[in-house]
Amino acid sequence: MQRVTFGSMPSSFVKVLKFGGSSVGSAESLARVASIIRGEAAACRPVVVVSALAGVTDLLVSLIDSKDPETIIARLAKRHIELAEAVLDGRRRYSYLRTIGGILDGLRERCQLPDNGFRSASILATGELLSAPLVAGLLTQEGVVAQAIDARRLVVTGPKGVDRIQTRQRIRAWFEDLSRFVLPIVTGFVASDEEGNTSVLGRGGSDYTASLFAEAVEAAKFDRWTDVDGLYTADPNKVKGAGKFLFLLLEDASSWNESSALGMHTEAFVPVLEACIPVHVRSTRFPQGDGTLILPRLLPGRIERDSRRQLAHANHTPQIAPTTEARINGFQ
């Protein structure tokens, strides 16, 4: 398959794409995710954040106090092996199975340890460590040079939660060193403390991870991909006639979320709100849908600032005929 080249826009045009567990939980949904990411990669520089496969974190919760851990680990292995067999070719499947074999061996060892305050977190972190290399392998197979990134070396937690200053510094340094030809697939939900011990961000933590990355890399937009086309006044799967929001102010959505009305991590909108980054809630099942666009109140000021920066970039760039690659990507 032809190798995908990232968009030709200036490097400041970065988007963070977050995919939840339902979006990566089956062969069909993984194929949709790969198609979405390939499309985004043709127009911008994506940073992808993924959750564990749907249901895996619940399995890991049951594993913490299980008297029969091997049965649960066998279920985890079967789930990921079957999915890999469905979406990966022979060479990449072999590579992925070697990767998860090491991860599951480490999980077995942690299950035998006494609870030292970090055991539970290291068990719960396993889901994202298993899903990120699967997504990266599928994308590489489809022509995108992708790499799984363990967020534990980038997201730092302390006694009061995420240390956003250290986290921002680490992510920025990592991103500056990252090749523009590599698309990162970042593990959501997982972090570590200053001593390097594994920690987790809590339920819905992958949204928080994505928001932290969006702030640190100064993303133009944060796309939160899920299986529902936007935000509704109630769960549309349970309440007939629930109304859909086409637009929301980010300030209002953040307040609403803090009261647990959205079912997301309570801190999920804080970094993007402070960085004035719009959030777009979209559906992998209906990617052409409008979704819900969540806009910061101060966004016009940022648009003016970014536009001036783009114009300054253009004014200092020699005017040359567009390359074939640029024409293909639509930037003429």
Image (cartoon, rainbow, N blue to C red):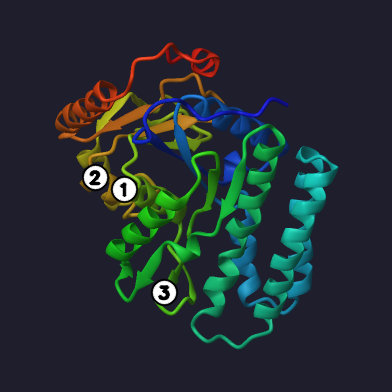
Asked if marks 2 and 3 touch (Cβ < 8 Å), the reply is no
Residue 28, percent from left and from top: 70, 33
Q: Say the numbered circle drawn on residue 215.
A: 1
Looking at the picture, tell me which residue is in the foreground, 264 or 77: 77
Which of marks 3 and 2 precedes in the sequence? Answer: 3
Which of marks 1 and 2 precedes in the sequence? Answer: 1
Query: Disc 1 and disc 3: Cα gap in Å?
Result: 20 Å
Query: Disc 2 and disc 1: Cα gap in Å?
Result: 6 Å
Can residue 49 be seen here? The reply is yes
Looking at the picture, tell me which residue is in the foreground, 236 or 179: 179
Query: Disc 2 and disc 3: Cα gap in Å?
Result: 24 Å
Write down the quadrant of residue 157 in the picture: bottom left
Q: Say the numbered circle drawn on residue 177.
A: none
Determine whether, in the image, residue 109 is placed left or right of residue 198. right
Q: Quadrant of the N terminus?
A: top right
Q: Residue at x 32, y 65 (%)?
A: 166
> Which residue does the numbered mark 3 point to in the structure image?
193
Q: Residue at x 33, y 54 (%)?
A: 266
Residue 230, percent from left and from top: 41, 30
Residue type at mark 2?
A: Ala
The relative height of residue 237 versus residue 62 in the rendered view (above or below) is above
The relative height of residue 116 versus residue 290 in the rendered view (above or below) is below
Residue 207, percent from left and from top: 42, 49
Residue type at mark 3?
A: Asp
The relative height of residue 280 versus residue 148 in the rendered view (above or below) is above
> Which residue does the numbered mark 2 point to in the structure image?
275
Which of marks 3 and 1 precedes in the sequence? Answer: 3
